[in-house]
Image (cartoon, helix red, strand yellow):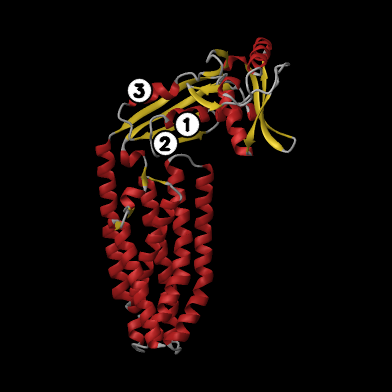
């Protein structure tokens, strides 16, 4: 049993060590490369540099009508931002009528602002002669709907649009079904967003587009089509450029502060709690790896507030261990064995840890739900950190302590801080 525990402990340490090395230095395995965390985590505007701009919709619309307008605008912005080839643009709604666009890594700020702020151009192009036959101004309505068990996009044209649409579809329907000449291309900003084939002449000005849509894809296509006739002007409320140098300096200082703080915490836990402190340090290393791994897996964007939340959650993870270890010391001083003290300490500390973390978790969820921009980044990192800290404190720390006790290296209670 002692040998088995020793082997398991050494295996855990080896995995943690290899994971930590890979996380911070990367690893090359044949043709496959694992990039370090610094290259895998997306950096926000405040770290990478770039430009942000806030637009406000000039409209008196309210309720569902306003929500529809804002959704259309966000969809158009997203398509235009994608044209820059950026890996991490942020486009969020602020309040009722404002939209914030963050473009990390953009070199020409004014060009970016001009590009995303211009009026959308929606066109219907006949496939047989590539002629523009209709524009977004002819669209009265576009919405997702369920027809005969499948999602479609219903359209409604104005009077002129209905007449032109009937003539064009009648002509296209004469071509072989499914051929290029048979299709009516729908383009937004010169990019094709749909290319439905025409079965027959469509009159009445109320066609629908089929194509094996899911609910989300049908809603998105409807929003993009509506965006071509966007009935609102946008005013640039605020814009600013963050230099890459400022972002790099801020990141370096934040990382340096985090390193100093972690070293101090590790030393304190080791000297004050001895063996439990060593276990806590291993668990904290696992905790940091879990948090960063989840952050990369979620493809989240790291900002300076996010780094602050990570450091804060490390403190909360340490706090959970302190509660457990103080309970452990009390149980040992009361005359219990180290093994019995561990069981009793974890059992009695669990309720306190759960209560304190749940209240902070609720605050993080509220911040994420109602916050915008960097506040969301802070909240997301805080939520991930709280969940990971509870797991490592209650499960990982206890598991490692049991391994140390099972090795039966010492029964001296002083080595457990008592």
Residue 213 seen from this side: yes
The residue at which mark 2 appears reads as 89
The residue at which mark 1 appears reads as 78
3D distance between C-alphas at marks 1 and 3: 16 Å
* Residue 313: mark in rendering: none
Of 43 and 34, the residue lying toward us: 34
Identify the element where label 3 is drawn: helix
Q: Where does residue 21 sit, x and y in percent of width and height? A: 29, 62
Q: Where does residue 110 sit, x and y in percent of width and height? A: 34, 23
* Proximity of marks 1 and 2: CB atoms separated by less than 8 Å: yes
Pick whichever of labels 1 and 2 is earlier in the sequence: 1
Q: Residue at the location (39% across, 82% down)?
A: 5
Q: Residue at the location (47% across, 66% down)?
A: 391
For the image shown, how many numbered marks are present on the structure? 3
Image: 369 above or below 174: below
3D distance between C-alphas at marks 1 and 2: 8 Å
């Amino acid at each position: 049993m002692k040998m088995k525990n020793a082997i398991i402990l050494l295996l855990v340490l080896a995995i943690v060590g290899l994971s930590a090395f890979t996380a911070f230095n990367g690893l090359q395995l044949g043709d496959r490369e694992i990039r370090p965390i610094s290259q895998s985590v997306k950096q926000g505007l405040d770290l990478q540099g770039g430009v942000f701009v806030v637009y406000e919709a000039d409209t008196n619309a309210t309720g569902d009508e306003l929500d529809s307008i804002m959704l259309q605008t966000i969809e158009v912005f997203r398509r235009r931002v994608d044209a820059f080839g950026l890996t991490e643009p942020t486009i969020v709604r602020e309040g009722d009528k404002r939209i914030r666009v963050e473009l990390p890594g953009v070199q020409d700020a004014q060009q970016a602002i001009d590009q995303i702020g211009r009026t959308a151009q929606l066109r219907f192009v006949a496939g047989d002669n590539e002629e523009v036959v209709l524009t977004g101004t002819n669209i009265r309505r576009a919405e997702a709907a369920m027809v005969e068990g499948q999602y479609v996009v219903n359209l409604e044209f104005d009077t002129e649009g209905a007449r032109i649409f009937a003539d064009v579809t009648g002509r296209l329907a004469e071509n072989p079904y499914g051929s290029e000449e048979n299709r009516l291309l729908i383009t937004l900003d010169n990019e094709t967003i749909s290319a439905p084939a025409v079965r027959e002449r469509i009159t009445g000005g109320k066609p629908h587009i089929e194509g094996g849509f899911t609910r989300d894809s049908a809603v998105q296509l409807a929003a993009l089509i509506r965006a071509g006739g966007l009935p609102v002007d946008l005013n640039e409320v605020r814009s600013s450029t963050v230099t890459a140098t400022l972002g790099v300096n801020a990141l370096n200082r934040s990382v340096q502060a985090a390193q100093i703080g972690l070293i101090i915490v590790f030393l304190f836990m080791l000297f004050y709690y001895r063996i439990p402190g060593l276990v806590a340090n291993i668990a904290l290393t696992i905790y940091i790896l879990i948090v960063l791994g989840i952050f990369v897996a979620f493809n989240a964007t790291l900002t300076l507030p996010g780094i602050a939340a990570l450091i804060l959650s490390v403190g909360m993870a340490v706090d959970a261990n302190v509660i457990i270890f103080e309970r452990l010391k009390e149980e040992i001083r009361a005359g219990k064995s180290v093994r019995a003290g561990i069981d009793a300490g974890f059992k009695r500390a669990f309720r306190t840890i759960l209560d304190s973390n749940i209240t902070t978790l609720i605050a993080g969820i509220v911040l994420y739900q109602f916050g915008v921009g960097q506040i969301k980044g802070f909240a997301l990192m805080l939520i991930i950190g709280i969940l990971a800290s509870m797991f490592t404190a209650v499960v990982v720390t206890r598991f490692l302590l049991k391994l140390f006790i099972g090795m039966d290296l010492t029964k001296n209670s002083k080595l457990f801080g008592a």
